[in-house]
Structure formats: C-alpha cells, structure tokens
Amino acid sequence: MTATGTAAPATARSTHLDGAVRSAMRAVSAAAGRGLGDAALAELVQIRASQLNHCAFCLHLHLGIARQEGVDERRLDLLAAWEEAGDVFDARERAAPALTEAVTVLTEGFVPDAVYEEAAGHFDADGLAHLLALVAAVNGWNRLMAARRIPPGSADW
Amino acid sequence: MGSFFPSLGGMTTNENTVPVSEPLAAEQSPRLEWAKHAPEVWKAMLRLEKAAAQGLDPKLSELVKIRASQLNHCAFCLDMHTKDALAAGESVERIVQLAAWEESRHFYTEKELAAIELTEAVTVLTDGFVPDEVYGRAAAHFGEAELAQLISAIAVINTWNRFGVTCRLTPGHYRPGQYA
C-alpha cells in the first residue's frame, strides 16, 4: 500500500485498435441503437452487460450517456438487482435485461426458451433483432476494452 | 450476397455424411432470422468481420474462432469455422484436439497457444479479468498491431456467437466462402 492508501495503478496494456475495426464496431452499435429506437433502454442493457463482463470503460461510458438521456438515478442504482427491484422496472424493462444476461453468460449454457419467449412477447421481430444486436455488440466492446484494460474515460484507445 | 440463410433446396437434414443407420433427430428451425430484421447491423457486422481479419493468419484466426465458439456453445459458428479451418488447410487432428489444447500442446506452436489462451480469458469475462500473465504471453508473441487484431477477432467472434446462439441458427449447411 502506498502512503496515500491507494493501490498502485494496474499495469498498462497499450494496444490501439485498428481504425477500421473501431469504425465498424461503432457502425454495428449505432445501427442496433437506431433500430431499437429506445435510447434509455439501450443504455440499461449495455450497462447490465458491462456489469456482468466487468468492463470499467464501458460502465463509465454508458452510465454517463444514461444520465445524459435523463434515466433516473434510482433505476441505474437498482439495475444490477432488477429482479428484486419491485416496480422500478416494468415488464418490458425486465424482459430486456433478462435477455441481456442470458446472451452475455453464454459460457454457462444456452439462452433459455422462457427468457427468449418473454422478450419476444415485448418486442416485435425487428425490435428483438436490434435489441440482440445491441447486446451482442456491447459484449464485443466489453472484450475490446477490458482485455486491453482501457481506463474509464480514456480517449486513447 | 444472398440471404443470410442458405437455401435448403429440399434437403431435410444437413449435407454432412453421417455414418449411422438409424434416423437422425429432427432439425430445429432458427428462432429468429435476425439479419433480415436488422439488415444495417448485418452489413456493419460483415464490414467488422473483414476489418478484424486484416493482418491475422487465417489458420490462427480459425483456431481462435473455433475455441471461442466451443466455449460459447455456438453450433452454427462451429459448423462454419471448422469448415473454414479445413478449407484454409488446417488438419482434422488440430481441430479435434483444440477443446483439450492444454493437454495437447505439442499439436500447436507457442504463438498459437498464446492466442488460444488469450481467447479463453477474453471469452469467459464474466468469471473475472484477463490475467496479466495471459496477456503478457500473447504480447510476447504478437506485435502491438497484430495483438490488437487478435483481440478484435476474439471480440468479433464473441459477438457473432451471441447472434448464433440466441437465434438458434441451424448448423450443418455452411459452405466455405458463402459470405465472402
């Protein structure tokens, strides 16, 4: 421990992304967000995936955007416990993070029929395809940023 | 480019040679033909796939994609990438041993092993962070630009796996070069 009581910064991992990869990733997320057409919900699912994947950069980014979008702080606070959060999230807002979690923890199994069907009951096929795309894309972003340990708020990546 | 989903042309099962005499289990239909419902995303994903492949050895890329698809249980992606690996000149033995690569190290180069190990760490992100020693071994074998491309390829196959598994895309019909 240092004299100030703070831990030493984690070892830096300097690897800049190729510009074409960065641009195409942005295009995927932008197209998914446009197709979903619900900016607040888009941020909620991207925050939830980033929590599960422990991506500090993405959490910082999407929490900031959510606040800019006017998402209530209480919803951001309780998102990680959405299942026990009473009426803070409506049925559609619960179906989306449920799907997000199933799609994010793939290494433990498949996306259960009940979770998929619940989401399909709240989103039409276009909406569901774009919701899935947003979750799939943020899972890509989480890996790009966490693997290279990009600090939250960094503009150098 | 045609439809995301290949024409089945009257086939009732996959076209692979299956050495059994009993009838096979019924083939499942996909839950959602996502590319038809999100064509702009599909186009951007194809662009992303090409961008992430630049500068990486195709055989190494396929080993990475197969291993990630094994960990994520993506049947469609396994069908695609084992066929692409074979088409790129990969051996059946190295594909078969890949799921147990830690006990089959002599099938692979040290550089390939570093890439496979990094693939696993980046794919199982929900279990924790990417360890310094795993990242360090990859950084020792790959230059900075190549390492960035490797990490990009791992991230992109993880994205594809999520489309494939969630939509339950049907394996067995892929032909190498189909989406090129």
Image: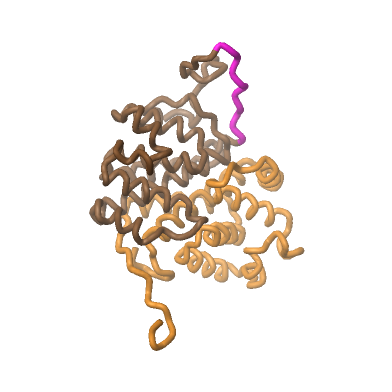
Chain colours: A orange, B brown
Give the quadrant of the C terminus of chain B.
top left
Which quadrant would residue B2 be assigned to in this image? top left
The residue shown at (47%, 39%) is B70
Which quadrant would residue A40 be assigned to in this image? bottom right
Q: State whether residue A29 appears in this view.
A: no
Give the quadrant of the N terminus of chain B.
top left
Q: Residue furthest front?
A: B103
Which quadrant would residue B116 be assigned to in this image? top left
Q: Is B81 situated left or right of A68 in this image?
A: left
Based on the picture, tell me whether residue B89 belongs to the magenta stretch. no
The residue shown at (29%, 53%) is B147
Based on the picture, tell me whether residue B27 belongs to the magenta stretch. yes
In this picture, which residue range is highlighted in magenta?
A: B21-31
Above or below, A87 relative to B72: below
Q: Is B175 situated left or right of B56 in this image?
A: right
Q: Nearer the viewer, residue B41 or A153?
A: A153
Main SS category, magenta section: loop
Q: Nearer the viewer, residue B109 or A42?
A: B109
